[in-house]
Image (cartoon, rainbow, N blue to C red):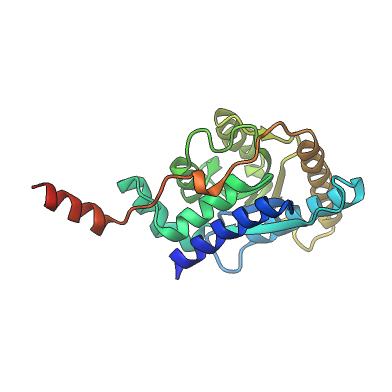
Amino acid sequence: MHVGLLGFLLWFMQTHRKSGITMTTIAVVSAGLSEPSSTRLLADRLGAATVGALSTAGRSTGDPVELRNVDLRPLAHEITDAMLTRFAAPALTTAMATVVEADAVVFVTPVFTAGMSGLAKSFLDVLDKDALADMPVLLGATGGTARHSLALEHGIRPVFAYLRAAVVPTGVFAATDDWGSDDAGTLDARIRRAGADLAWMMRASRRQPQQADALPEVVDFASLLGGMQRQQ
């Protein structure tokens, strides 16, 4: 089923390129470990704020804007396998293609030990080192208390700077107390500001369109093993 999904994704992209139809896409990556997840909630709201800002600013001549969610939690085993074998399974390949093909990325992770979660970092590690070059990126993070808020700037932003992503100035950290409290309006204002920053960065982006079919072809381990046996 995953192979068929990847095939459909490649067909969809190629067909729309040939027909001249364009679509602005934003990959919304959530590294939340629970279900439901405040990390996913923050990611969704940041994505929606960006779409709203693009619509208000009139980024394009009527081209639709689509949010494409990439939840890392269901991909945890495949990400680990890719770290160990350097081969990505079909579902992970689809997620990687979604990120690489996007016009922008919203990336939200819970904070662990003053940095992003191991799941989030591992996903970045299996991407090609140039996959996010010049990519407009909006960063978000969640944590139990406001004491973790500086991790966004000191533990997460430098990783994306190393990957040469175009990270927007405003990052959004949401502590547990930010949800449903008297300060919720402050969180809403930060989300709107961050969405407007990403919309501006997308309009100024110099990133060239990337193609999902340019990603390395996935070869399953059984086929590789069969080739080795034939050589012997």
Q: Is residue 135 above or below residue 24?
A: above
Q: Quadrant of residue 16?
A: bottom right
Left or right side of 193 for 17? left
Q: Quadrant of residue 152?
A: top right
Please state the horizontal and vertical placement of residue 36, each as a whole percent of the image: 61, 68
Residue at the (35%, 49%) spot, across then down: 87
Q: Is residue 163 visible?
A: yes
Left or right side of 3 for 42? right
Residue at the (19%, 54%) spot, across then down: 225
Residue at the (65%, 32%) spot, across then down: 134
Considering every residue shown, the one lying at the far left of the view is 232
Give the quarter of the figure containing the N terminus. Answer: bottom left
Considering every residue shown, the one lying at the far front of the view is 18
Q: Nearer the viewer, residue 85 or 42?
A: 85
Please state the horizontal and vertical placement of residue 214, each as a whole percent of the image: 50, 43
Please state the horizontal and vertical placement of residue 31, each as a whole percent of the image: 55, 54
Q: How many marks?
A: 0
Please state the horizontal and vertical placement of residue 117, each as a whole percent of the image: 51, 48
Q: Is residue 140 visible?
A: no
Q: Quadrant of residue 167?
A: top right
Q: Nearer the viewer, residue 62 or 73?
A: 62
Residue at the (45%, 45%) spot, across then down: 122
Considering every residue shown, the one lying at the far bottom of the view is 1
Q: Nearer the viewer, residue 161 or 24?
A: 24
